[in-house]
Image: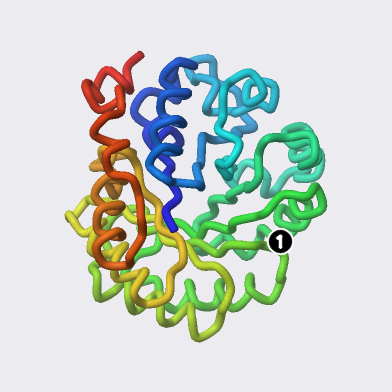
């Protein structure tokens, strides 16, 4: 399965300042392509006047735009905003109960060596009715021991729905990616996700390797737009999944999308 996080990760390029028109065209594009899982933006606690609406994704905003009914919608929070503070108060200020929100999944981004502090955050979001994805970030080739201890700790909680790991700095090779997936799968049999970056040009190969070794979800963005060098291009991985895994993504939706005609201005409006 693909999770498209174009606007969340691409927002690093323009401080999440996307017009409603661009957001709706984007949602229509990925929906027409057959993608059913989208991470629309962040839900930050701290306010910054230079940031656009997708840095916060308030429920009122989500209710005001046209979102295809079939899309499963996620937002990301940063664990560091809730650790060493009144997490309950701060989460209550950001999240209503799921029944009152268009959001389906909340992804908690936490550096792998700090993720073991996120148990309360997971518990609270589950209590509110959301599916929870715990995303272990900043994974590097030399972090195996601490990373695996963290995995062992968090899987014992049984309070999240998806476990993710992220090649945040784009340092992993395909061999290392496969190795990490196999190690996780020795301990965890739930839904597993992988988020790659393209700093060394391995985003595609790493993601395919992850899928071949037991990952269920990989992240991608239109045109590979994202922080730094960028991400795995959705239109590329969709074609590969059609060819190698028998998926049926509608590739024509990407080439015919109005966002494809001038995708640089897409991120500057």
Q: Quadrant of residue 223?
A: top left
Number of numbered discs on residues: 1
Q: Report if residue 98 is visible in the image.
A: yes
User: Residue extending furthest bottom?
Assistant: 186
Q: Report if residue 74 is visible in the image.
A: no
Q: Is residue 24 left or right of residue 167?
A: right
User: Residue extending furthest left?
Assistant: 201
Q: Which is more toward the observer, 217 or 132?
A: 217
Q: Is residue 17 above or below residue 234?
A: above
Q: Is residue 178 left or right of residue 49?
A: left
Disc 1 is placed on an element classified as helix
Name the quarter where the C terminus is drawn: top left
The residue at which mark 1 appears reads as 119
Residue 211 position, x and y percent, is: 37, 69
Q: Is residue 1 above or below residue 78?
A: below
Residue 93 position, x and y percent, is: 77, 32
- Residue at the image point whose x is 36% and y is 60% from the top: 247
Name the quarter where the N terminus is drawn: bottom left
- Residue at the image point whose x is 76% and y is 42% from the top: 98
- Residue at the image point whose x is 80% and y is 47% from the top: 128
- Residue at the image point whose x is 24% and y is 70% from the top: 174
Residue 198 position, x and y percent, is: 24, 51
Q: Is residue 113 above or below residue 18?
A: below
Q: Quadrant of residue 204?
A: bottom left
Residue neighbourhood size for the residue with mark 1, other residues' Cα within 10 Å, grouped as few (<14), some (14–19), many (≥20): some
């Amino acid at each position: 399965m693909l999770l498209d996080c174009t606007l969340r990760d691409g927002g690093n390029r323009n401080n999440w300042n996307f017009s409603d028109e661009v957001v709706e065209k984007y949602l229509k594009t990925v929906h027409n392509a057959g993608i059913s899982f989208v991470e629309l933006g962040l839900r930050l606690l701290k306010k910054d006047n230079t940031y656009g609406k997708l840095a916060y994704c308030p429920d009122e905003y989500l209710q005001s735009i046209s979102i295809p009914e079939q899309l499963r919608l996620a937002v990301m929070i940063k664990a560091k905003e809730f650790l060493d503070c009144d997490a309950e108060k701060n989460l209550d200020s950001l999240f209503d109960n799921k029944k009152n929100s268009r959001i389906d999944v909340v992804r908690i981004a936490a550096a792998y060596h700090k993720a073991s502090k996120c148990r309360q955050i997971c518990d609270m979001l589950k209590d509110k009715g959301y599916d929870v994805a715990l995303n272990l970030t900043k994974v590097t080739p030399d972090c195996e021991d601490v990373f695996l201890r963290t995995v062992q700790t968090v899987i014992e909680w049984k309070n999240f729905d998806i476990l993710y790991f992220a090649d945040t700095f784009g340092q992993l090779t395909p061999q290392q990616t496969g190795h990490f997936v196999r190690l996780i799968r020795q301990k965890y049999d739930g839904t597993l996700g992988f988020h790659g970056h393209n700093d060394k040009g391995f985003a595609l190969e790493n993601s395919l390797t992850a899928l071949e070794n037991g990952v269920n979800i990989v992240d991608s963005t239109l045109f590979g737009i994202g922080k730094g060098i960028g991400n795995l291009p959705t239109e590329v991985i969709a074609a590969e999944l059609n060819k190698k895994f028998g998926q049926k993504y509608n590739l024509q939706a990407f080439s015919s999308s109005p966002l494809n005609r001038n995708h640089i201005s897409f991120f500057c409006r």
